[in-house]
Image (spheres, rainbow, N blue to C red):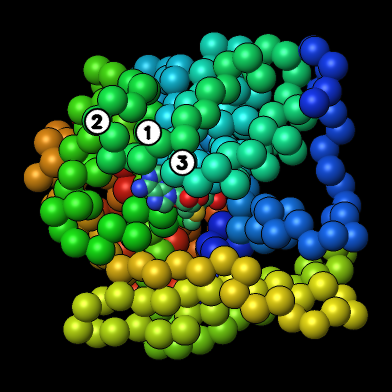
Amino acid sequence: MSKKQSDKKMKNKNKKGKAKKEKMEASADFDKYYYYRNSVQSPDTDVVFLRDTYKEITGKKPKVLREDFCGTFSICCEWAKLHSDHEAIGVDLDPEPIKYGMENYLPLLKEGPRSRVNVYQKDVLDKKLPAADVVAALNFSYSLFKDRDTLRQYFKNCQKTLNKDGVFVCDIFGGSQCYEPNEEETEHVDKGFSYFWDQDSWDPVTNEAMFYIHFKRKGEKKREKVFTYDWRMWSIPELREIMMEAGFSKTFVYWEGTTDDGEGDGDFKQVESGEDCESWVSYIAAMK
Ligand SMILES: C[S@@+](CC[C@H](N)C(=O)[O-])C[C@H]1O[C@@H](n2cnc3c(N)ncnc32)[C@H](O)[C@@H]1O
């Protein structure tokens, strides 16, 4: 059994027209979104994958991306930067990360891309969400829907609010390691902190699992449970079946390639079957 580990896995106002410089160093205050971004987010590669996946499936170029469960909407910002035709829509229930993105990420954009990002504080189950060519639900956020009916309702809403030829994309993780409590530390020596992905529990009867993210800055006490995720572990076939029940016409699984030493190589390709790993991350794309 190989061990495949993608770095993507969580277990990883300024003057008009002028973009601020990206924040390179953490502030003395504990900024949980700074550490989160530097541990688990890779929005610049996510947007390339989303664009290429839409192109591969439809043969066309996408314009409008909706980032559901957007949090600090970093993917929206990268999408708007990627091409001058791109528009991005972020949707999240929580005003706190939205405010953070408005204060820390949006001002980094030049006026053009900045004018093409719109964020809504709404429920992803809201039936009147703006239409898009690509809807992305990344970092496994749909896992908070623990019953099939609610998850189907969410997928149905995505299917209905996609434009003609629209594509929905979500990620999923799994592997034998996900079926036992374990905590994994990733040291960011250059940035002076450690990130901990803590799977606290897994219930074989319900497939529910509790996860936490902890951080420890060099020379400081470990900060426990900075982020908490109370999720159901869905499987790839379950998600594909529910997507089809929700009205999608076809689904595709993107599986990561493996390096010679058994690690994930970051290159995701359409597959019909996968391989047994201790730990894997994959994507599912569904065509309207
Ligand atoms: C795991 S975080 C993901 C944030 C971001 N997508 C990322 O990749 O880092 C989940 C986000 O989903 C939001 N959320 C939870 N339930 C929601 C719902 N029903 N509608 C919209 N947003 C929701 C939370 O506020 C939180 O910001």
Which quadrant of the view contains residue 184? bottom right
Identity, as a three-letter code, of the amino acid under mark 3: Asp
What x and y, as percent, mark residue 228?
Answer: 51, 69
**In the drawing, what numbered circle is on residue 7?**
none
Please tell me whether mark 2 sits on a helix, a strand or a loop.
loop
**Precedes in sequence: disc 2 or disc 1:** 2
Which quadrant is home to the N terminus? bottom left
**Precedes in sequence: disc 2 or disc 3:** 3
Identity, as a three-letter code, of the amino acid under mark 2: Lys
**In the drawing, what numbered circle is on residue 135?**
1
Q: Nearer the viewer, residue 9 or 277?
A: 9
Determine which residue is flagged by label 3.
92
Contact flag, marks 2 and 3 (Cβ < 8 Å): no
**In the drawing, what numbered circle is on residue 127?**
2
What x and y, as percent, mark residue 119?
Answer: 52, 29
* Residue drawn at (53%, 17%) of the image: 86
| Residue at the extreme left | 245
- Can you tell me whether the CB of the residue at mark 3 lies under 8 Å from the nearest atom of ligand 1? yes
- Can you tell me whether the CB of the residue at mark 1 lies under 8 Å from the nearest atom of ligand 1? no
